[in-house]
């Protein structure tokens, strides 16, 4: 073992495997960990004085792995920087730092981005300008420079801003837009071949898998056969197909069958993203979807899912509109929304539905949807669409169209569309792991970005007794590391990357609310990233040890 640089001493180790907690000390050297018998730290240090993290009376776990984020650009060139010359202490800078720090303060040391079909890569060179506009709206980071491939994406991550580690999936929506734009049609054979080639290259370079967002244009324009061909590429690399289902509401069971069919035909492991049964027509459907997943797994299909611990979701506002409205991209969408006849058609489609469309508003109502981020109308943030429209004396569809026009499409929302018993069932399922689905944009983002992991440990684990501490930690560490082939992460064992969390199991809890969504959690004493103390006494240090993780 190399010379010990730091000791974590006196804690109870919950190692990420699901095994019972046990006393242990940990020695850190060269960013790796060695597990020691309790009280053996001084011997491992060879009598030298080394820094100590005192974990007496606390629990030590692997660093948490957030399997579902949308933080791709928070530390990327072209990402959400304030004005040139801004520095810590400036309001804009500090607001972005608060977003960047939120996952770290609750113990997340690795994030998996590129979910729901949206990643910052890959793209044919001639499609880069068109894709940039789409990514600006998706990530709220305009103007952003999309990357041609995974290697360019990795190179664009700035170490000076990288607080934790980042892996990325290949987003099918980005892939499709990067080859054939935003056309609502099947790809030509040469276009499908180009998508497969770009995907194969990205997976070879270290991307973690393939994701789809089949409610979002242009992903929603793809049929099952297109996704099967791409998932076969992921299967050849032994990497998962990760999907935001085509419908998580009234047609969730049908959409789940499509995902299972894609996995079976392609041979790719299946990860069902943020599994939920949302909207009044789907409440209670987890009583059927979870047994279906369990049966598929028993039949030999490698299927798992992830979940966030809230009854509200969050997404882009334009996803509330029927898919035809977005054909041709954001520019075409905004131009359409100026026309009164288009607005009438949108109203009719929401009221009557469109075959194959999830129709969030039709399954719930504008009274369940609140504005999370709207750069052009900050006063609207935190308020429900129905209330905003009523206050302005306008129809909700007209309010939404005008809001999108004012903000150049860059609006995110929070949808209060789920039921508590469904969330609890998915959390308790042995097939589920934890992902925040965080959408880190300024404004009033969903509190899941700052609270998901502490909420599972505190509210659902300790207070509600839904999960044991060992099971909850396994869902946050060992299980996702195994699913996404994150070698050396997720389990505390000799030689593992020294990503660690030290927490008080009796005090850990989420503090973030919908009114104050970035309040840090309580009870997280220390976080180590690659052996460096990144959080001490609940506060971030100056350490920036995060790196882009390449999955081989």
Image: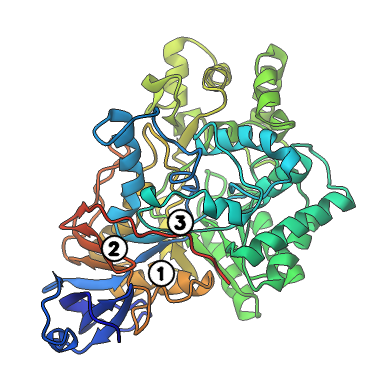
Query: In which quadrant is the N terminus drawn?
Result: bottom left
Mark 3 vs 1, N-terminal side:
3
Give the SS element for disc 2: helix
For this view, does 349 lie left or right of residue 88?
right
The first of marks 3 and 2 along the sequence is 3
- Camera-near label (3 vs 2) is 2
Which residue does the image show at 71% across and 44% down from the upper left?
178
Q: Name the residue under label 1.
A: 475
Q: Can residue 361 be seen in this view?
A: no
Separation of residues labelled 3 and 2 (CA atoms): 18 Å
Q: Is mark 1 on a helix, strand or loop?
A: helix
Mark 3 crowdedness (10 Å alpha carbons): few <14, some 14-19, many ≥20: many
Relative depth, front residue between 394 and 539:
539
Describe the element under mark 3 as helix, strand or loop. Answer: helix
- Residue 43, quarter of picture: bottom left
Q: In the rendered image, which residue does mark 3 sit on?
A: 422
**In this rendering, which labeled residue sits more in front, label 3 or label 1?**
1
């Amino acid at each position: 073992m190399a010379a010990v640089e730091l000791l974590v001493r006196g804690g109870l180790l919950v190692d990420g495997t699901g095994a019972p907690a046990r006393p242990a000390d940990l020695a850190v050297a060269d960013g790796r960990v060695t597990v020691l018998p309790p009280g053996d730290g001084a011997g491992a240090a060879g009598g030298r004085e080394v820094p100590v993290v005192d974990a007496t009376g606390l629990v030590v776990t692997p660093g948490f792995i957030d399997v579902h984020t949308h933080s791709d650009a928070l530390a990327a060139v072209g990402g959400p920087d304030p004005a040139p010359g801004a520095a810590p202490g400036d309001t804009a800078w500090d607001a972005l730092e608060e977003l960047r720090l939120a996952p770290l303060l609750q113990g997340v040391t690795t994030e998996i981005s590129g979910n729901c079909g949206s990643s910052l890569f890959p793209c044919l060179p001639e499609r880069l300008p068109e894709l940039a506009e789409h990514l600006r709206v998706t990530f709220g980071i305009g103007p952003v420079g999309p990357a041609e491939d995974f290697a360019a994406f990795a190179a664009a991550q700035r170490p000076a801003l990288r607080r934790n580690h980042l892996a990325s999936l290949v987003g099918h929506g980005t892939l499709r837009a990067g080859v054939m734009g935003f056309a609502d049609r099947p790809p030509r054979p040469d276009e499908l071949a180009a998508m497969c080639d770009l995907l194969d290259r990205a997976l070879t370079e270290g991307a973690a898998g393939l994701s789809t967002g089949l409610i979002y244009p242009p992903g929603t324009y793809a049929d099952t056969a297109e996704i099967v061909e791409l998932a076969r590429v992921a299967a050849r690399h032994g990497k998962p197909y990760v999907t935001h289902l085509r419908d998580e509401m009234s047609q969730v069971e049908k959409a789940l069958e499509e995902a299972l069919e894609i996995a079976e035909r392609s041979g790719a492991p299946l990860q069902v993203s943020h599994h939920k049964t949302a909207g009044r027509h789907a409440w209670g459907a987890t009583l059927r979807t979870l047994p279906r997943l369990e049966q598929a797994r028993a039949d030999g299909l490698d299927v798992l899912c992830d979940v966030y611990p809230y009854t509200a979701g969050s997404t882009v506002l334009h996803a509330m509109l029927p898919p035809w409205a977005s054909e041709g991209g954001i520019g075409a969408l905004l131009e359409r929304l100026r026309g009164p006849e288009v607005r009438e058609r949108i109203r009719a489609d929401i009221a009557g539905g469109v075959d194959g469309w999830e129709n969030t508003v039709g399954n719930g109502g504008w009274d369940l949807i609140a504005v999370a981020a709207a750069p052009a109308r900050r006063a609207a943030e935190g308020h429900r669409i129905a209330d905003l429209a009523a206050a302005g004396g306008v129809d909700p569809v007209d309010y939404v169209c005008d809001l999108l026009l004012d903000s150049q499409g860059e609006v995110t929302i929070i949808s209060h569309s789920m039921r508590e018993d469904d969330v609890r069932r998915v959390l308790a399922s042995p097939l589920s792991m934890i992902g925040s689905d965080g959408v880190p944009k300024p404004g009033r983002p969903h509190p899941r970005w700052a609270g998901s992991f502490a909420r599972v440990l505190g509210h659902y684990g300790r207070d509600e007794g839904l999960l044991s501490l060992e099971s909850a930690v396994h869902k946050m560490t060992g299980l996702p590391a195994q699913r996404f082939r994150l070698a050396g992460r997720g389990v505390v064992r000799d030689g593992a990357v020294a990503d660690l969390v030290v927490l008080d199991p009796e005090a850990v809890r989420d503090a973030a609310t919908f009114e104050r969504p970035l309040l840090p959690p309580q009870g997280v004493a220390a976080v180590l990233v690659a052996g460096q103390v990144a959080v001490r006494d609940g506060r971030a240090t100056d350490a920036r040890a995060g790196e882009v993780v390449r999955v081989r």
